[in-house]
Image (cartoon, rainbow, N blue to C red):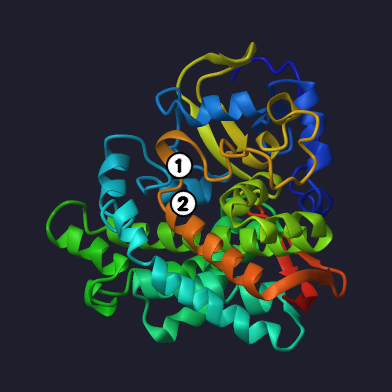
Amino acid sequence: MTTITTPSDLDLFSDENLTDPYPAYRALRDEAPAVWLDRVGCWAVTRYDGVREVLGDWERFSAAQGVGMNDEVNTATQGTILASDPPLHDTLRGVLAESLSPRAIKSLSGSISEQAHRLVDSLVEDGGFDAIGQLARVFPPSIVADLIGFPQDVRPRLLPWGDGVFNALGPVNERMTSAMPLLQELYGWVYGIQGSDLTEGSMGRAVYDAADRGVIDHASAPQLLVAYTAAAMDTTINAIGSAVWLFSTHPEQWDAVRADRSLIPAAFNEVLRFESPVHVFTRVATRDLAIDGTPIGEGDRLMVLYASANRDERHFGDSADEFDVTRDASDQLAFGYGLHGCAGQGFARMEAHALFEAMADRIERFEPAGTPKRHLNNFVRGLETLPVTIRKA
């Protein structure tokens, strides 16, 4: 390991910093392009340019040794789509390329729009709702479960399993250790099923069909199912919950969206930038190198802090800590960048855009109806509850 020039004792995974990480992120950005964190034994890369550099160069910054922060989970996930480099990564990602193509996603837009309007219509009649429990944790899971083809009896376990996956990737703390039984339960189920247990014509069934054709190893099929399930739900759930929270606390921004529906794509990008649903993954340096002059040693692990990069005033200007739906945030990094950029981001955008459109049709104003409760997770950021009252359009 290289000589550490800027060590820090900061604990990014404390309850305090998980509740509000942005002051700590700013302090790290101001300290150096990369800061060694003694508590977790790796570098924190926090500035936009540095994060984009790491994500964009898999040959120097490898995912093949795991993208988490503990040896147990990193070892267990090696060779998965998250924890692999080319050529294996390209083979695994290619399995769902057809299912996630723009044409395939567009074919689902009508159905998803109908579901969004139906859900919002049911919620506005009561004059208020919990934007997490009745909206964010209802809309994406129902769509993803159908898309991947999960049997009905396992669907109630999908949300706990997804949350457990992201907690298990963290450092060895209480959240990580408490997630391990959930991870064991998830893997016990997924390694016990056959492709025929998933709905015919679904994305999940396509994974097992690819294994039967010899495109991928049969051992890779369960791992692909786990990766796409967790990524497709928790990130979208948290983004939708954050959107309602931001629109309730910034009513003028919701007014702007309702007045000009062409702002919906920009508004969702700004939600992703301002409250990135995934805060961190890691990479390992494959050689001695430097990030903007900070030396990194071969074998060093680096935390790639998406959420910090998306608040970096060096890139987004002095207003980086302001929520503005008219901002061009199309280059935000919440969905990653480069080789491991989120394969399903087009699908996530379609879900969110449909829901924004439905809410804009029926809801004139969101108003907080109590104190939101933050849901603490090692790798993803979201809310546990968000009570709101609404004024009908």
* Amino acid type, mark 1: Gly
Instruction: Kindly report the distance in space between the C-alpha atoms of the residues bearing marks 2 and 1.
Output: 8 Å
Residue at (52, 41) in percent of width and height: 336
Residue at (74, 88) in percent of width and height: 126
Q: Position of residue 240 (x, y in %)?
A: 63, 63
Give the farthest residue toward the top: 293
**Neighbour class for label 2 at 10 Å: few (<14), some, many (≥20)?**
some
Q: Position of residue 358 (x, y in %)?
A: 58, 71
Which quadrant would the C terminus be assigned to in this image?
bottom right
Q: Does residue 225 lie above or below 263 as drawn?
A: below
Which label is found at residue 345?
2
Decide which of 247, 284 is in the foreground and name it: 247
Q: Is residue 107 visible?
A: yes
**Neighbour class for label 1 at 10 Å: few (<14), some, many (≥20)?**
some
Which quadrant would the N terminus be assigned to in this image?
top right
Image-based side of 245 in relation to 53, left or right: right
Q: Please name which of the two marks, 2 or 1, marks the residue nearer to the observer.
A: 2
* Amino acid type, mark 2: Gln
Q: Is residue 64 visible?
A: no
Which label is found at residue 341?
1
Image-based side of 222 in relation to 366, left or right: left
Q: Position of residue 304 (x, y in %)?
A: 60, 35
Q: How many discs mark residues in the rendered view?
A: 2
Residue at (36, 62) in percent of width and height: 225
Decide which of 322, 302 is in the foreground and name it: 322
Secondary structure beneath label 2: helix
Q: Circles 2 and 1: CB distance less than 8 Å?
A: yes
Image-based side of 210 in relation to 118, left or right: left
